Image: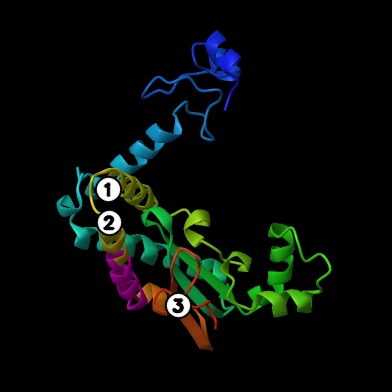
Amino acid sequence: MILPATANANGGLCMPCSQGRGKCERCGISMSSARGDGRFICYECSTTEKIAALPFLDADWKKVEDVDWSRIASNYELFGRDLLRLHAARQGADPAYGMVFQLSQNGVLDIHINTQEGIAGIPAKMRSIANWGKELTDEGWLEKMGLWYTPSWRYDSIGCTLKSEFAPIEDFHYRLHEVLSGADDDQELVSKKFDEARLAAVAAIKASPQYAAIPKTADFRCQTADDDGLDYDTKQQLGA
């Protein structure tokens, strides 16, 4: 957001962009600074470039009936299996007690994992993200939050922290969700189709060698959650 006076004085641009620090090499839009790799390429063009790098993502789907949903399910599976492959090395021998596949907004499939050693980090993680509970001890935090509040987990949303070569799949699905949601399609049908594809992918991931390779406790549990973090089938709080 910029002041109207600033926009009027600079042809609709903010002050840094109006100073001509650079233009996107693909679309030519003014940019205030280069991206982390030193290139002047805007977010939208960078995303488009990454998607184009995976040829199997090249599809022109505008309506629900256009989409090959089995291919979408395979995309989710491919990305999820690669994330677990990458994650296994950093988890080491510390066994996981829980894993959550979360059907998040905009067609995203999040994967959360916590381990036995990760339990000790829950109080510190909560203190860093909560603006309440300053009076709670470590034991108080654990009693209050339990072991199934995924934002407090050591390995929360591993797709955001691990550099998978298949990460553009997530951008592709996000864009597809936006396209279908902006069309005249029944939005409940759009949500249903994305849920079906993600649930099929979760089943395939759980049957994969990458899932089997994750060290687990004897009482390990894997759950599927909706966007609110509730059990997908019962809508009950995880861990209940």
The first of marks 1 and 2 along the sequence is: 1
Task: Determine contact: label 1, label 2, CB under 8 Å.
Answer: yes
Kind of residue indicated by mark 3 = Gln
Mark 2 or mark 3: whose residue is earlier in sequence? 2
Which quadrant: the C terminus?
A: bottom right
Across and down, in percent, residue 194 comes to: 30, 60
Residue 180's mark? Answer: 1
Identify the magenta region.
Answer: 196-208
Q: Residues within 10 Å of mark 1 (few under 14, many from 20)?
A: many
Q: What numbered label is drawn on residue 190? A: 2
Q: Callout 1, which amino acid?
A: Leu
Secondary structure at numbered mark 1: helix
Please check the rendered image and state whether residue 202 is part of the magenta-colored stretch, yes or no.
yes
Residue at the spot of label 3:
223
Task: Tell which residue pokes out farthest to the top in this image.
Answer: 9
Residue 51 in the image, given as x and y percentages of width and height: 32, 43
Indicate the amino acid at tag 2: Val
